[in-house]
Image (spheres, grey):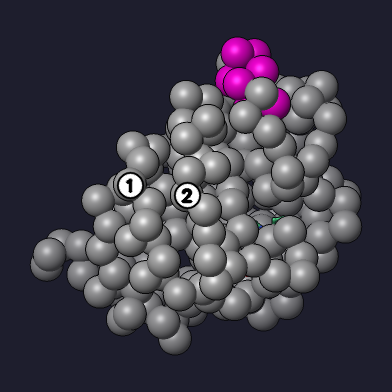
Amino acid sequence: MKVKICGMREAANLWAVADLKPDYLGFIFYGKSTRYMRDTLSASRVRNLPAGIKRVGVFVNADLTNVQATASAYALDYVQLHGHETPEYCQQARDSGLHIIKAFAVGETFDFTTLTTYEPSCDFFLFDTKGALPGGNGTAFDWQILAGYAGTTPFFLSGGLGPDNLAALLAFHHPQLYGFDFNSHLETTPGVKDVAVTQQLLQRLHHESANS
Ligand SMILES: O=C(O)c1ccccc1NCC(=O)[C@H](O)[C@H](O)COP(=O)(O)O
């Protein structure tokens, strides 16, 4: 199972977490987020992450030209779209060479038929919890609702994941489950991950994968 750690914003913390070798690291390019990182992390620091870690830029209803320029400056491997971006927007982004993770906010119900038109343009979906904020709400949704997802695009499971629900997480299965996305439940303050907690979590995940 792949692991994405999202919302990095401090240089020293970024290097410490990168040393733990997560598969993906996420950077928030949404100005209203407490994890906004344009002022705290230079493009060269992000570009120079160790090989093997995929860089993901998170955007919310951003102008496509801005997304393209940012993806190029920070050498982003993926753009994660967390707003009301349409299938046409995703297709245009993909046609320009970007790789797409489209996030969807899941509430008590979710109409999975709305995903069909996104399938051709998206590399991954990310199912997050519906909340007051576009992301980073820190609450989990009822993952059983994903039994209704019968599409072919692999997905990241997200929303309030952390050490406290890791056992339940490891017991959750879905044919298209690709990875877990962690954020606020690993933090000491918004944008700063607790390195010891993150290390323990990754060790537990690797241990479980090796034994499954
Ligand atoms: O984290 C943010 O501040 C954020 C703000 C706006 C859009 C997306 C954002 N985060 C994207 C993520 O991928 C988070 O990891 C995801 O929402 C889950 O966060 P959490 O519930 O805190 O685990």
Q: Amino acid at mark 1?
A: Ala
Q: Is residue 44 left or right of residue 111?
A: right
Taking the spot 64% from the left edge, 14% from the top edge, the residue there is 96
In front here: 138 or 119? 119
In the image, residue 92 lies in the stretch drawn in magenta: yes
Let me know if residue 76 appears in the view: no
Q: Please give the residue where the numbered disc 2 appears in the rendered image.
A: 112
Q: Earlier in the sequence, mark 2 or mark 1?
A: 2
In the image, residue 47 lies in the stretch drawn in magenta: no
**Local SS, label 1:** loop
In front here: 49 or 68? 68
Toward which corner of the image does residue 174 lie, by quadrant? bottom left
Q: Is the CB of the residue bearing disc 1 within 8 angstroms of ligand 1?
A: no
- Estimate the spatial distance between the alpha carbons at disc 2 and disc 1, rounded to whole Å: 8 Å
Q: Residue furthest left?
A: 211
In magenta, the rendered stretch is 89-96
Q: Please give the residue where the numbered disc 1 appears in the rendered image.
A: 150
Q: Tell me the quarter of the image containing the C terminus.
A: bottom left
**Local SS, label 2:** helix
